[in-house]
Image (spheres, rainbow, N blue to C red):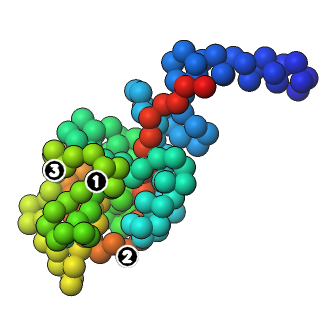
Amino acid sequence: MSSNFTISLFLLVAIACLSEGCCPERFMQVGNRCYYYNSGKVDWHDARAACLRLGAHLVSIHNLEDSREVYALWKSLVDESLRDNSDAAYWIGLNDERIEGSFKWSDGTHTDYTLWQAGEPNDSNGGEDCVAPRNQGRNDFDRQKWNDNQCGNRKSYFCRRSLYRS
Ligand SMILES: [Ca+2]
Ligand SMILES: [Ca+2]
């Protein structure tokens, strides 16, 4: 590639980012937000730290549309065999590590919506403080419903950040 072409391409991208905003490398744009999915399984704290290193946070969910957006993206990225499979669930940012029963989002946004499975959160197994959709149930809606898990469990995860303007 000629250097002139490379420079032109760079300028085009920069102009697009200036006018509309864009997502960093490895992030996918959905509406005006940027998502990063990592299928590698890590514990909740490692997932949180990985998102922070990318200038993002574990996803927070504030209405059913948010939940559908994340779940639809996940479905588009993974093999069909992983659907309805609790081992394939992904971490979200909700946790109650500081005060048992008081669930907070790791991005600092308000806990204004919940989508618990029946019987959850149950803080079972000697304590469960970190949340993931269980990815198990009769339909997509049921599979999005949340379960509190042990934070040391290893799961894939979703980070999210806003668009940036160059
Ligand atoms: Ca708990
Ligand atoms: Ca639970």
Q: CA distance from mark 2 to mark 3?
A: 22 Å
Q: Say what secondary structure mark 1 lies in.
A: strand
- Taking depth in this image into account, of 95 and 120 the one nearest to the observer is 95
Tell me where residue 149 sits by quadrant.
Answer: bottom left
Q: For mark 2, does the 10 Å Cα neighbourhood hold few (<14), some (14 to 19), or many (20 or more) residues?
A: some
In the image, residue 83 lies at what x, y percent?
Answer: 34, 54
Which residue lies at the image location 37% right of the left edge and 58% below the top edge? 90
In the image, residue 155 lies at what x, y percent?
Answer: 41, 65
Q: For mark 3, does the 10 Å Cα neighbourhood hold few (<14), some (14 to 19), or many (20 or more) residues?
A: some
Foreground mark, 3 or 1, reads 1
In the image, residue 148 lies at what x, y percent?
Answer: 22, 67
Q: Say what secondary structure mark 3 lies in.
A: loop
Residue 27 shown left or right of residue 109 in the figure:
right
Q: Is mark 3 within 8 Å of ligand 2?
A: no
Whichever of labels 3 and 1 marks the residue nearer the N terminus, that label is 1
Quadrant housing the N terminus: top right
Q: Quadrant of ligand 1?
A: bottom left
* Residue type indicated by callout 1: Trp
Residue 16 in view here:
yes
Q: CA distance from mark 1 to mark 2?
A: 18 Å
- Taking depth in this image into account, of 114 and 102 the one nearest to the observer is 102
- Residue 152: which disc? 2
Q: Is residue 153 above or below residue 16?
A: below
In the image, residue 21 lies at what x, y percent?
Answer: 52, 24
Which residue lies at the image location 51% right of the left edge and 58% below the top edge? 50
Residue identifier under label 3: 114
* Residue type indicated by callout 2: Gly
Residue identifier under label 1: 105
Tell me where residue 117 sits by quadrant.
Answer: bottom left
Residue 56 shown left or right of residue 13 in the figure:
left
